[in-house]
């Protein structure tokens, strides 16, 4: 009997355009991510992620979902807001893990897919009921400055531009699609009709009429984005972080829809 769902067991897993390691890596999945299997080819699964992105993953990165059916609801879940190393495993910023227990010393036991546990300080975590302000979101984004660019990346091991923005906004409960061209169609954001820029507004750049790059504003002139590495740029000519290449492109500014603020 073919399985219909699997769980990522490694800290992150590369996802490919075709079922071969020679293919282009198009995205990543992080530990504990549930993947729906829609097709098979030898040792590969064609999967669909939570954001409806479809790609191929090698079976060595996953385990069959034979855990308790209610595990998603049995535990409280939280995001890592730092890149951490525990018990011989590297866990990326933005990993989403279940809480096995809370300790009196302000530490948390997190559960891994192999049923082992790791201890993490509470202040390194974001819970679903935590209030994350725009200032807080900007601070978390800036903590990733210098992280290398990686085509298809959406982890501390490397980000591409849309993967970076998707990962940051997910911490605030705002679920954006994977790619720029789809993000601009999301109901979570809308094109701005005014010129005033506020924290966490998004700037999408166009090339040949297609949206190909995105950054998030950290003030009214500068935005943070992944290009070469996670860095700060501006299209304001007198700004110290002025980027001539981006300033020559058409762009649109988008804001978070009211219901997500």
Image (cartoon, rainbow, N blue to C red):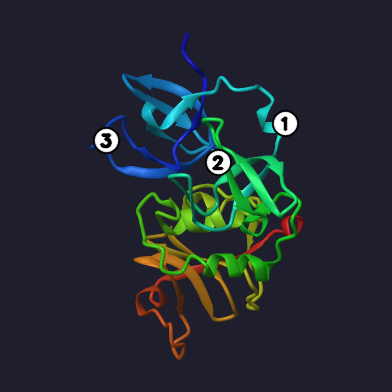
Q: Residues within 10 Å of mark 2 (few under 14, many from 20)?
A: few
Callout 1 secondary element: helix
Q: Residue at x 66, y 67 (%)?
A: 136
Mark 3, residue position: 21
Judge whether 238 appears above or below 213 on screen: below
The answer, for residue 91, to whether it is visible in the render is yes
- What number is the disc on residue 74? 1
The answer, for residue 201, to whether it is visible in the render is no
CA–CA distance between discs 2 and 1? 23 Å
Mark 2, residue position: 51
Measuring from the top left, give residue 253's x and y in whole percent: 57, 68
The quadrant of the picture occupied by the C terminus is bottom right
Q: Earlier in the sequence, mark 3 or mark 1?
A: 3
Measuring from the top left, give residue 217's x and y in whole percent: 56, 72
Give whichever of 223, 10 is nearer the camera: 10
For discs 2 and 1, the disc positioned in front in the rendered view? 1
Q: Earlier in the sequence, mark 2 or mark 3?
A: 3
Q: Are marks 2 and 1 in contact (CB under 8 Å)?
A: no
Callout 3 secondary element: loop
Callout 2 secondary element: loop
From this viewpoint, which residue is outermost toward the left? 22
């Amino acid at each position: 009997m073919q399985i219909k769902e699997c769980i990522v067991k490694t800290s992150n897993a590369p996802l490919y355009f075709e079922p071969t390691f020679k293919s282009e890596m198009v995205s990543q999945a992080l530990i504990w991510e549930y993947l729906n299997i829609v097709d098979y080819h030898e040792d590969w699964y064609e999967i669909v992620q939570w954001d409806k992105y479809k790609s191929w993953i090698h079976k060595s990165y996953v385990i069959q979902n034979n855990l308790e059916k209610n595990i998603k609801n049995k535990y409280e879940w939280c995001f890592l807001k730092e890149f951490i190393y525990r018990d011989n495993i590297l866990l990326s910023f933005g990993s989403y893990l279940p809480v096995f227990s809370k300790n009196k010393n302000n530490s948390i036991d997190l559960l891994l897919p192999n049923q082992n546990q790791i201890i993490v300080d509470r202040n390194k975590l974001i819970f679903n009921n935590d209030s994350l302000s725009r200032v807080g979101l900007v601070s978390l984004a800036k903590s990733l400055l210098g992280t290398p660019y990686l085509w298809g990346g959406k982890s501390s091991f490397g980000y591409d531009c849309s993967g970076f923005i998707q990962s940051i906004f997910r911490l605030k409960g705002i679920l954006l699609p994977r790619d720029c061209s789809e993000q601009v169609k999301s109901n979570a954001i809308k094109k701005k009709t005014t010129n005033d820029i506020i924290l966490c507004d998004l700037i999408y750049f166009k090339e040949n009429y297609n949206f190909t790059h995105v950054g998030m504003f950290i003030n009214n002139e500068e935005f943070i984005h992944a290009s070469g590495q996670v860095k700060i740029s501006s299209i304001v000519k007198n700004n110290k972080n002025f980027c001539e290449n981006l300033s020559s492109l058409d762009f649109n500014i988008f804001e978070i829809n009211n219901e997500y603020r």
